[in-house]
Image: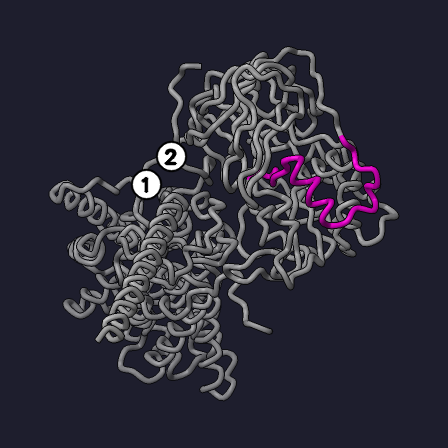
């Protein structure tokens, strides 16, 4: 039996799941929202998605080439970041916006902090925040869809802004289908729900984060509006809440590890989203709420580690 | 599930690919004796046995060839009759070199005079402990802790519940399953005798639900015995972990750093109980065990094999390994040890010998993506990714605080890790470093104390003289 036998430490069987196929599944789950954005906003959506994904992948590849690191482009995580970034842009953004954003997301936020798993803020959201502050006019505009005024026209008011005045102005069907002004990936809620539920069923994201995030936004609006059920429900289906709750707040690197920590993360995101939407200057607060909770994640992790099995009270 | 409770965490190793269902249909066959056996004197946790034979001695089957050296130790018996050709060393599958006795088989199978118990149902606890110790019985699930030590509770502690482990949660392994099917009567009888001897009123045989035939065979055998029941358990690895099994059956939680006896439980593997029954009823010491040979071999099977048989005899009996075989494992695929040298002997703890293919070779490690799958998989509710990071940064004190000493090395975290990180291996190393440091610190403290005492004595002497 003198063949090439190998000695390795146990365990000797492994699950099939790998970083690569987890990321591929996230891409698959993001696909419906991307297709919806192309249908709703036309070719410009496709153009932005392509620029964003290509920039992210290329930035990661080039940085690792120059820095002499092993390339991790094959794990598809840069593709996920590229898609998320594009989904956070309006269809009217020029081509160089996702290019600048992609470099910020991958180089500044992800690679310089140690690459996959080591960044402390969501790369796509951080890039979006930088773009938002630097080129507000280009990034913070909410174009109409092809079926509602045309992409060339910039909406004076997003559904969230309209709703603040009168919730009955916004049609529930339009919210679900995404036929409302907004950024690429956020409008079509059916597509987002489809992808999000897929990820939960596949065990890739923890249901606790989207459930507590969306749940707390709903409850807070319900309580503060004197139990206006319609308003609370529409708040949930408007803006970037779904995109944020299913795809952004659940980013592995920047959400807490423990189950309790994730509940805190979800509720925290919900509370800050509510506060920004209801009381602050910005009409939408999802992305800043998530970024804020990203920064709190190490602290949450520290205080929410599970008790060991066997760590029992004496004389309980 | 008959009220069995789920322990925290756990995984479902891929069923179906491992041939567990197929191999469990293969009856136990006796492996023909080989011409030369190498019997290690250290097949148990604790001090190695001391050889009681020398080169040239004629030994009988079942004769003691090694005496236990201490309380936590076990005697070793000859598994063939024949001539001692060497009292030297051998290599175990783990790679450890241990003292061993090599015996040339005369193929007469002459037994020593066996002393079955004259009153098996009226044994005192001390008598039962003595029989079990003399028979060299150790934990046969693989841990090989001397059984009589488990059955000797510290002062002030009593055995309230006997838990018999028939979970066999490791993929591939089917030896316990076959034993439960073919020897349900003896296993149940063994439990009953232990209950009588130790005055235990309550015993549970826990079997995973994927072995329904074993559950019914044991239930049939156990019907009418007061205080003994068979409980089906959810199929979940590591269901056979001592603390996990106790929780699933009794809902009791063994405190951190504690033993099962702290919650009134003693856990014995079905193979161990079978060996106890053989020892009490017939006086037969532990010289044979059932071992699964599985994976990439031409004809997988379950074998009754003599302790000391080189594993290559098992592979030969199975028609050899297939060309796809890349790795050999002693034990199960989750906790077993990989080895190369097929001359190494079968020991009391060898529950299986497996041939695995290239999928068992480690893929390259990548960065942790913080997916937290390891936290969900950990049956001890630890945070493996965090402990791994601490250990790799040599922050051992923090790793200890994070609970690394509670790790049972079941491998569940490493199994699920999508980044393919060597988590379990990291914890093994970390635990070793922490233990070494503790010992060093204790030795240093003792030395300082001794020095202080000496100085004090010298001072007092000076004072007196002054």
Which residue shows up at 22% across the image and 55% down it? A110
Image vertical order of residue B352 relative to residue B410, above or below: above
Do tag 2 and tag 1 residues touch (Cβ < 8 Å)? Answer: yes
Which residue shows up at 38% across the image and 19% down it? A4
> Quadrant of residue A2 in the image?
top left
Residue B387 placement (x, y as % from top left): 36, 55
**Quick check: can you spot residue B92?**
yes
Magenta highlight range: B115-142
A276, B437: nearer the viewer: B437
Label 1 crowd (10 A; few <14 / some 14-19 / many >=20)? few
Disc 1: host chain: B
Residue B414 placement (x, y as % from top left): 43, 44
Secondary structure beneath dot 2 equals loop
Secondary structure beneath dot 1 equals loop
A72, B346: nearer the viewer: B346
Q: Which residue sits furthest bottom?
A: A226
Residue B137 forms part of the magenta stretch: yes
A69, A93: nearer the viewer: A69
Label 2 crowd (10 A; few <14 / some 14-19 / many >=20)? some
Q: Which residue is mark 2?
A: B362
Residue A196 located left or right of residue B445: right
Residue B247 located left or right of residue B85: right
Residue A176 placement (x, y as % from top left): 46, 64
- Number of dots carrying numbers: 2
Which residue shows up at 54% across the image and 43% down it? B70
> Quadrant of residue B449 in the image?
bottom left
Residue B178 located left or right of residue A234: right
Disc 2: host chain: B
Q: Which residue is mark 1?
A: B365
**Is there one chain holding both mark 2 and mark 1?**
yes
Residue B266 placement (x, y as % from top left): 65, 52
């Amino acid at each position: 039996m003198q063949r090439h036998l190998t000695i390795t430490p146990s365990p000797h069987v492994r699950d099939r799941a790998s970083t690569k196929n987890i990321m591929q599944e996230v891409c698959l789950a993001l696909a419906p929202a991307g297709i919806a954005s192309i249908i709703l906003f036309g070719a410009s959506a496709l153009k932005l998605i392509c620029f964003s994904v290509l920039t992210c992948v290329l930035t990661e590849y080039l940085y690792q080439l120059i820095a002499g690191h092993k390339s991790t482009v094959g794990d598809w995580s840069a593709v996920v970041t590229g898609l998320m970034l594009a989904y956070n842009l309006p269809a009217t953004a020029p081509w160089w916006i996702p290019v600048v954003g992609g470099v910020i997301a991958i180089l500044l936020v992800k690679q310089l902090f140690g690459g996959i798993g080591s960044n402390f803020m969501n790369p796509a959201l951080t890039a979006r925040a930088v773009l938002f502050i630097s080129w507000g006019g280009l990034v913070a505009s909410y174009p109409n869809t092809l079926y509602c005024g045309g992409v060339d026209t910039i909406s004076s008011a997003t559904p969230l802004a309209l709703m603040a005045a009168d919730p009955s102005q916004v049609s529930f069907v339009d919210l679900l289908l995404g036929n409302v002004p907004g950024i690429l990936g956020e409008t079509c809620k059916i597509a987002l729900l489809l992808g999000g539920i897929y990820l939960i069923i596949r065990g890739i994201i923890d249901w606790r984060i989207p459930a507590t995030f969306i749940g707390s936004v709903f409850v807070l609006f319900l309580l503060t509006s004197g139990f206006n059920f319609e308003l609370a429900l529409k708040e949930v289906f408007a803006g970037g809440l779904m995109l944020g709750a299913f795809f952004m707040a659940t980013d592995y690197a920047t959400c807490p590890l423990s189950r309790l920590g994730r509940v805190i993360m979800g509720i925290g995101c919900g509370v800050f989203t509510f506060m920004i939407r209801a009381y602050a200057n910005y009409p939408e607060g999802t992305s800043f709420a998530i970024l804020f909770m990203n920064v709190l994640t190490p602290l949450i992790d520290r205080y929410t580690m599970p008790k060991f099995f066997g760590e029992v009270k004496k004389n309980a | 599930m008959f009220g069995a409770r789920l322990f925290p965490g756990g995984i479902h190793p891929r069923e179906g690919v491992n041939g567990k269902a197929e191999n469990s249909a293969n009856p136990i066959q006796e492996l023909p004796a080989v011409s030369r056996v190498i019997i290690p004197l250290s097949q148990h946790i604790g001090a190695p046995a001391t050889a009681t034979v020398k080169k040239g001695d004629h030994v009988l089957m079942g004769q003691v060839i090694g005496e236990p050296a201490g309380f936590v130790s076990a005697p070793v018996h000859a598994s063939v009759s024949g001539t001692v050709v060497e009292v030297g060393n051998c290599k175990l599958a783990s790679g450890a070199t241990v003292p061993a006795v090599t015996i040339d088989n005369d193929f007469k199978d002459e037994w020593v005079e066996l002393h079955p118990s004259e009153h098996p149902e009226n044994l005192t606890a001390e008598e039962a402990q003595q029989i079990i110790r003399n028979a060299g019985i150790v934990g046969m699930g693989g841990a090989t802790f001397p059984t009589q030590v488990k059955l000797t509770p510290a002062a002030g502690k009593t055995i309230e519940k006997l838990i018999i482990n028939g979970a066999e949660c490791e993929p591939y392994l089917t030896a316990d399953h076959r034993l439960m099917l073919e020897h349900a009567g003896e296993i149940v009888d063994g439990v009953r005798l232990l209950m009588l001897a130790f005055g235990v009123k309550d015993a549970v045989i826990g079997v995973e639900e994927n072995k329904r035939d074993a559950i019914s065979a044991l239930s049939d055998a156990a019907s009418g015995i007061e205080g003994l029941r068979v409980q089906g358990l959810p199929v979940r690895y590591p269901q056979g972990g001592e603390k996990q099994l106790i929780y699933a059956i009794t809902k009791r939680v063994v405190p951190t750093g504690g033993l099962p006896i702290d919650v009134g439980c003693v856990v014995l593997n079905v193979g161990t109980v079978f060996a106890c029954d053989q020892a009490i009823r017939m006086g037969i010491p532990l010289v044979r065990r059932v071992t699964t040979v599985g994976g990439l071999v031409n004809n997988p099977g379950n074998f009754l094999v003599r302790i000391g048989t080189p594993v290559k005899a098992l592979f030969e009996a199975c028609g050899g390994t297939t060309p796809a075989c890349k790795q050999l494992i002693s034990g199960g695929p989750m906790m077993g040890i990989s080895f190369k040298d097929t001359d190494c002997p079968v020991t009391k703890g060898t529950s299986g010998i497996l041939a695995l293919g290239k999928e068992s070779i480690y893929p390259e490690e990548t960065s942790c993506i913080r997916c937290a799958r390891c936290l969900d998989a950990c049956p001890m509710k630890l945070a493996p990714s965090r402990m791994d990071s601490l250990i790799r940064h040599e922050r051992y004190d923090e790793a200890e605080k994070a609970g690394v000493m509670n790790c049972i090395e079941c491998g569940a975290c490493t199994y699920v890790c999508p980044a393919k990180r060597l988590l379990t291996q990291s914890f093994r190393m970390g635990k070793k470093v922490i233990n070494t440091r503790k010992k060093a610190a204790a030795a240093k403290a003792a030395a300082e104390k001794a020095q202080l005492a000496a100085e004090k004595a010298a001072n007092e002497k000076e004072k007196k003289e002054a």
